[in-house]
């Protein structure tokens, strides 16, 4: 009897321990499952389920309607039927209103807009001593402008900036906090300044202050984007006629001043735009015109553009022995809408929450971005600048400037033009690897920028 009772007790004890072990296993599985769900949610796996498929033809982004008529009205200084939904009304603290008016009768060729952090005094000085030299070529009039925000609680930095602006008169400052997530504000305030104070240039190049830029290659690129740099590779001699450069004695000695020393106190129905296959993309606005005069002007201009576009296509495909010379002598028409740089065609939003570029479904519901140009360096023709600027009035603000301009370009029917020689990363450097490079990212060291630029200039590539 005792043996039987002992066996029953031992069986009961074993059974209880077994149940506890099973419970622990079940609890472990439950905890593991909860952990995996939390991890997947953190990495955005469930968000992807609810994303809207990006469809180029059916894509909409607030303002959800055709904006071309409103943009046209704004460009004509008329009141649009629908009020803008997004305006950047920050005040300018430093304006430099005369910067582009020194030669008011002459059209500028290129204006460089450098998006700079307010504290990067050394980088700005290096740019002024290298690719930002305004009188590099006498027959290519340019301007260089640095755009910054504010450090409201750092009076020392603000004082140094005002001293710098007083000496060089090339700094535009607007009243917003200078930070990474305010880069869209910085970009659009740059647009605003250009439209109001510097409308007399054919091209505008936006650059970060840690970029190497070859102004020579850029000048060659904007003459013939569709064929750069391939026609140069056929014969370097074609571009052997060097432009006369100014002497060092003509330049202001920027190195004498050390700022780190703390003791120093769209108007018409059709617009031309490049596409990836180097053809001309025309966007049509089907809205009816309100007055016959605008319709007549539109028909006349469209006929002119049709003729120009046919000439472009013939020139790009003309198999003649003089083609290289014709390509070099080629000049883009004034109404071209060029938005060029390194283009991402099928990039997806970051849905994992630890990412610096995390985007919620509320901010952007689609699974892909529209085509956009990386923000480090890109070039705009005047028509593209104006259409993007006024279309931004009807584009909901987005915190990343390159994505925002991609959204604006999509609404304006401007197709970004891709060029491999706009390097958004730091291209590995050798003397001859930068022959055709237009820009390269990652030159935050001013001394390195000066060294590379001077070497490439001596080789005739900068």
Image: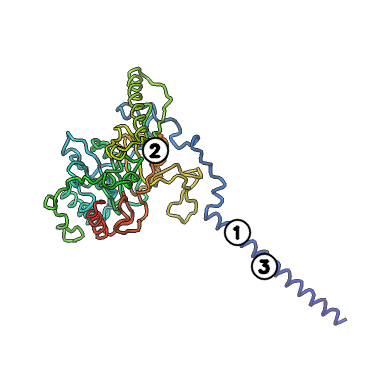
The residue carrying pointer 3 sits among few (fewer than 14), some (14 to 19) or many (20 or more) residues within 10 Å by Cα, namely few
The quadrant the N terminus occupies is: bottom right
Residue farthest toward the left in the current orientation of the protein: 249
Residues tagged 3 and 2 counted as in contact (Cβ below 8 A) = no
Where is residue 331? Give x, y as percent: 28, 36
Q: Secondary structure at mark 3?
A: helix
User: Above or below — where is 306 with respect to 354?
Assistant: above
Q: Secondary structure at mark 2?
A: loop
Residue farthest toward the top in the current orientation of the protein: 292
Q: Which mark is residue 24?
A: 3
Residue for badge 2? 278
Nearest-to-viewer mark from 3 and 2: 2
Residue farthest toward the right in the current orientation of the protein: 1
Q: Secondary structure at mark 1?
A: helix
Asked which quadrant contains residue 203, the reply is top left
Where is residue 365? Give x, y as percent: 50, 43
Q: Which mark is residue 34?
A: 1
**Which residue is more in the foreground, 243 or 199?**
243
Separation of disc 3 and disc 2 at Cα?
Answer: 66 Å
**Which residue is more in the foreground, 11 or 106?**
106
Separation of disc 1 and disc 2 at Cα?
Answer: 52 Å
Residue at 24% in and 54% down: 459
Residue at 21% in and 60% down: 260
Q: Can residue 320 be seen in the rendering of this structure?
A: yes
**Which residue is more in the foreground, 390 or 100?**
100
Residue at 64% in and 61% down: 30
Which is more N-terminal, label 2 or label 3? 3
């Amino acid at each position: 009897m005792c043996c039987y009772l002992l066996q029953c007790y031992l069986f009961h004890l074993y059974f209880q321990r077994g149940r506890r072990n099973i419970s622990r296993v079940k609890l472990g599985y439950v905890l593991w499952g909860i952990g995996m769900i939390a991890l997947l949610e953190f990495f955005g796996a469930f968000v992807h389920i609810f994303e809207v498929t990006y469809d180029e033809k059916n894509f909409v982004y607030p303002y959800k309607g055709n904006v071309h008529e409103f943009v046209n009205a704004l460009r004509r200084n008329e009141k649009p039927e629908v009020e803008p939904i997004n305006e950047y009304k920050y005040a300018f603290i430093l304006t430099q209103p005369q910067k582009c008016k020194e030669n008011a009768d002459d059209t500028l060729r290129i204006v460089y807009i450098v998006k700079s952090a307010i504290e990067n005094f050394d980088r700005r000085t290096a740019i002024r001593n290298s690719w930002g030299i305004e009188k590099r070529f006498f027959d290519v009039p340019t301007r260089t402008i640095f755009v910054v925000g504010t450090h409201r609680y750092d009076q020392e930095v603000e004082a140094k900036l005002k001293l710098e602006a007083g000496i060089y008169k090339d700094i535009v400052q607007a009243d917003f906090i200078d930070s990474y997530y305010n880069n869209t504000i910085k970009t659009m305030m740059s647009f605003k300044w250009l439209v109001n104070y510097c409308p007399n240039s054919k091209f505008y190049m936006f650059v970060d202050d840690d970029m190497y830029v070859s102004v020579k290659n850029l000048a060659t690129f904007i003459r013939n984007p569709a064929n750069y740099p391939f026609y140069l590779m056929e014969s370097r001699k074609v571009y052997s006629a060097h432009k006369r450069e100014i002497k060092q004695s003509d330049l202001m000695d920027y190195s004498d001043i050390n700022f780190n020393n703390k003791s120093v106190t769209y108007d018409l129905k059709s617009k031309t735009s490049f596409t990836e296959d180097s053809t001309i993309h025309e966007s049509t606005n089907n809205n009816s015109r309100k007055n016959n005069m605008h319709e007549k002007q539109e028909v006349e201009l469209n006929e002119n553009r049709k003729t120009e576009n046919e000439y472009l296509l013939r020139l790009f495909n003309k198999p003649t022995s003089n083609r290289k010379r014709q390509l070099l002598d080629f000049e883009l028409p004034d109404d071209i809408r060029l938005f060029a740089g390194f283009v991402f065609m099928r990039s997806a939003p970051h849905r994992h929450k630890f990412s610096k570029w995390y985007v919620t479904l509320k901010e952007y519901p689609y699974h892909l971005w529209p085509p956009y140009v990386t923000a480090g360096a890109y070039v705009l023709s005047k028509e593209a600048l104006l259409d993007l600027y006024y279309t931004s009035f009807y584009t909901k603000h987005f915190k990343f400037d390159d994505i925002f301009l991609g959204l604006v370009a999509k609404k304006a029917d401007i197709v970004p033009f891709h060029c491999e020689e706009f390097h958004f990363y730091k291209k590995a450097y050798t003397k001859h690897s930068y022959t055709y490079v237009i820009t390269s990212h990652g030159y935050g060291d001013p001394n390195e920028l000066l060294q590379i630029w001077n070497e490439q200039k001596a080789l005739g590539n900068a």
